[in-house]
Image (cartoon, grey):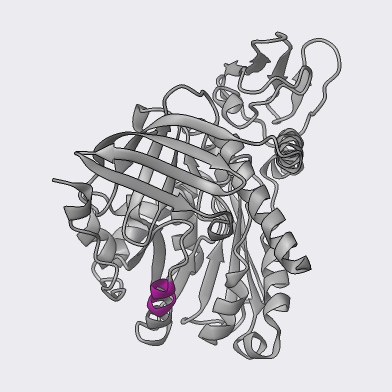
Amino acid sequence: MKDSQVKRFDMLEKPRKQKWYLVPVAWLLAFPTVWKHRLRIRKHNMQGVKPPYILLCTHHAFVDFSVTTAAIFPHRANYIVAIDGFIKRESLLRNVGCICKRKFTNDILLIRHIKHSLSVNKHICAIYPEARYTLVGTTAILPESLGKMCKLMKVPVVVLNMHGDYLSQPVWNLTKRKVRLEADMTQIATKDETQSLSISEINERIREAFVYDEYKYQLESNQKIKFKDRAKGLHKVLYVCPHCLTEHEMDSDGALIWCNSCHKTYSMGEDGRITALEGKTEFSHIPDWYEFERELVKKEILSGKYHFEDRVTVDSLPNADGYIRLGEANLVHDANGFKLEGDFDGEHFLLKKEVESMYSLHIEYDYFGQGDCLDLSTLDNTYYLYPLTKKNVVTKLHFAVEELHKLNKDTDATV
């Protein structure tokens, strides 16, 4: 069956109230997990706050959902969940109150669903606006539409800023580690304030409440991660050698990360700090290395040299039944955005995503054992793309999407 003929996920169905009989099940799954990690929740300005309200959550790892469940106990919620979370379990997720979303798309229908969750279901609406797990334990870009949405809903706005979740299972190595978890739950705007504050003022409050740095938290909480493979996979995000500036030649194993070009090697300590085995340690703090890479991408874009092109394997996810292998296509990313073009079952395929349409990019590392991938979504389909010849490139692609969008926005503002 051709991709154009496949049934699409029903995005029109309104969010259901969380079934009462599934609520105790959610508690039974969540609380042993958070108890094991000795979760401590600090509540700020939360006196008298009851559903319905908007809950904006930082996004680190799968354990986030257990922390969120514990934080809102004993209340129920509707949760915004990406389409891949519904695979083979659509009925279950709908019954526990999940609302489907395709990442980094401008979805007016989602606003209606959030409104229904709050005004009809009278639930908390839990949203993870970073839209993907943090790559190095720091805050991802937040959409500017958040403030407008909060103002429109006319309910209190609460932020749940979690600490330790990323350290317990970083996205570049999903092996679980023993880490103590904490969370700050803060009402950042009352119902009345959502109407009196400007959109930019609401956005500023959200940004301030969303600041986090997991490696700083590790140091300040004096936690040692003794996991022997604590640096394995770290080269997925730290893909540029800070010594020789070679890209995509980093590798890692055990507690070490090294460059295959100049062979400079670094060790990741139990405290999360980086140390060069010989010579200068350019970056001891992992997020600093990460932001150094971002600046390199920005400079490449400004010089007009940025261009990515590769053949990719394409999987389609039109509904919750699972992925459909479409075949191979050509992917280009440059100052004009993404262009994906190919022929599937004799049918020409073309998908363009302009720079202004995407403020960030969802990427995965070694996704289900098939390799690194990025995904591009329309309102009725999501395409998972696996580069075939270029290695360890998806982190750079995500930087490029973000920096191109920022530069485009800045250009528009000056016109």
Please name the residue shown 43% across and 74% down the image: 108
Determine the image quadrant of residue 327: top left
Could you tell me if residue 54 is visible in this image?
yes
Which is nearer the eye, 275 or 141?
Answer: 141
Residue at image point 46% right, 61% down: 105
Q: Is residue 49 left or right of residue 97?
A: right
**Which residue is most to the left?**
1
Q: Can residue 175 be seen here?
A: no
User: Which residue is depicted at the point 23% across and 68% down?
Assistant: 21
Question: Residue 36 in the image: x percent, y percent?
Answer: 48, 44
Magenta-highlighted residues: 108-113
Image spot of residue 45 (x, y percent): 67, 77
- Measured from the top left, where is residue 402 in percent x and y? 63, 50
Q: Is residue 414 above or below residue 371?
A: below
Q: Is residue 324 left or right of residue 409?
A: left
161 horizontally vs 102: left or right = right
